[in-house]
């Protein structure tokens, strides 16, 4: 859920920064939303596979719960890294000439 709220906030900030830099608004503006949807899908698939492995290996529900949290934290960290790198590259562009 955190990723969705952060993606909406990042989209607004990317749009503001793109206007300031004077570049095409569509590509940098929607990057956080596209990345968020991709990370949610990847996280869902990883969780699904890990739950199946835990069930087949007869791990306890506690291990499954902890594995789910670890996977969610890892996917969130990857998402934040992707968005911060995109923000740095957008910030490195020269300002719009008046």
Image (cartoon, rainbow, N blue to C red):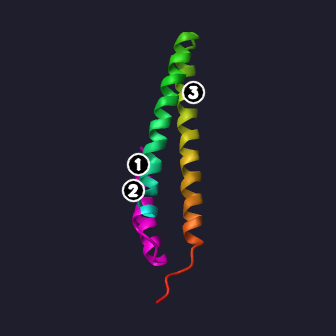
Residue 80: where, in percent of width, then height? 55, 51
- Secondary structure beneath dot 3 equals helix
Contact, mark 1 vs mark 2 (Cβ under 8 Å): yes
- Taking the spot 44% from the left edge, 66% from the top edge, the residue there is 13
Most common secondary structure along the magenta stretch: helix
- Secondary structure beneath dot 2 equals helix
Query: Is residue 62 found inside the magenta-colored segment of the image?
Result: no
- Taking the spot 59% from the left edge, 59% from the top edge, the residue there is 85
* In-image side of 33 versus 58 (left or right): left
- Quarter of the image where the N terminus is located: top left
* In-image side of 62 versus 19 (left or right): right
N-terminal of the pair, mark 3 or mark 2, is 2
The numbered dot on residue 4 is 1
What's the magenta region?
A: 1-26
Q: Between marks 3 and 2, how big is the CA–CA gap? A: 27 Å
- Taking the spot 43% from the left edge, 70% from the top edge, the residue there is 24
Q: Does 78 sit above or below residue 13? A: above
Instruction: Name the residue carrying label 3.
Output: 67
Q: 63 or 35: nearer the eye?
A: 35
Q: Between marks 1 and 2, how big is the CA–CA gap? A: 6 Å
Q: 31 or 77: nearer the eye?
A: 31
Instruction: Name the residue carrying label 2.
Output: 8
Contact, mark 3 vs mark 1 (Cβ under 8 Å): no
């Amino acid at each position: 859920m955190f990723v969705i709220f952060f993606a909406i906030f990042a989209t607004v900030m990317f749009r503001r920064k793109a206007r300031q830099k004077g570049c095409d608004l569509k590509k940098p503006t929607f990057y956080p939303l596209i990345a968020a949807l991709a990370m949610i899908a990847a996280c869902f698939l990883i969780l699904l596979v890990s739950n199946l492995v835990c069930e087949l290996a007869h791990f306890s529900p506690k291990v499954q719960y902890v594995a789910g949290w670890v996977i969610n934290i890892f996917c969130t960290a990857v998402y934040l890294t992707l968005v911060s790198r995109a923000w740095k590259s957008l910030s490195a562009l020269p300002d719009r000439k008046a």
